Amino acid sequence: MSLESSERKFVFKLDEFLQEQNLDKFNSNKKNLKFRDGSLMNAWFNNNKKEILESTDEKCKEVQEQHKKV
């Protein structure tokens, strides 16, 4: 997979993650919140947590604000 394809996939998942209002998406004990492709939201967040929480990107900042409410 090319870097461009990987980045595009990340952006699509980030958009979908942001749209999910249920904050259980951050909880590793909750296995019911999934992306359209069937992958677990909490696993994706945990795999990308460092990048998202350190980012200055506007969408990542929105996720950071949601994460603070957990």
Image (cartoon, rainbow, N blue to C red):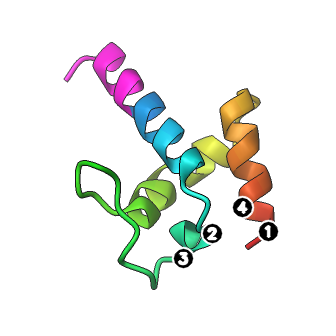
Task: Report the Cα–Cα distance between label 3 and label 4.
Answer: 10 Å
Name the quadrant containing residue 26. bottom right
Residue type, mark 3 in image: Asn
Residue carrying label 4: 67
Magenta stretch contains residue 11: no
| Tag 1 and tag 4, C-beta contact below 8 Å | yes
Percent coordinates x, y for residue 63 in the rendering: 68, 48
Given the image, on which type of amino acid does mark 2 rest? Leu
Residues packed near mark 1 inside 10 Å, few (<14), some (14 to 19) or many (20 plus): few
- Name the residue furthest left: 1
Q: Residue at x 44, y 81 (%)?
A: 30
Disc 2 and disc 1 in contact, CB within 8 angstroms: yes
Among numbered discs 3 and 1, the one appearing first in the sequence: 3
Task: Give the mark nearer the N terminus: 3 vs 4.
Answer: 3
Q: Are circles 2 and 4 on residues that touch, CB within 8 Å?
A: no
Q: Residue furthest bottom?
A: 29
Query: Tag 2, which secondary structure?
Result: helix
- Which residue is drawn at the image coordinates 79% and 53% (left, top)? 65
Cα–Cα span, label 1 and label 4:
5 Å
Which residue is identified by label 3?
Answer: 27
Q: Magenta span: helix, strand or loop, mainly?
A: helix
Q: Are marks 3 and 2 in contact (CB under 8 Å)?
A: yes
Residue 23's disc is 2
x 59%, y 68%: residue: 22
- In the rendered structure, which segment of residues is drawn in magenta? 1-9
Provide the residue designation for mark 1. 69
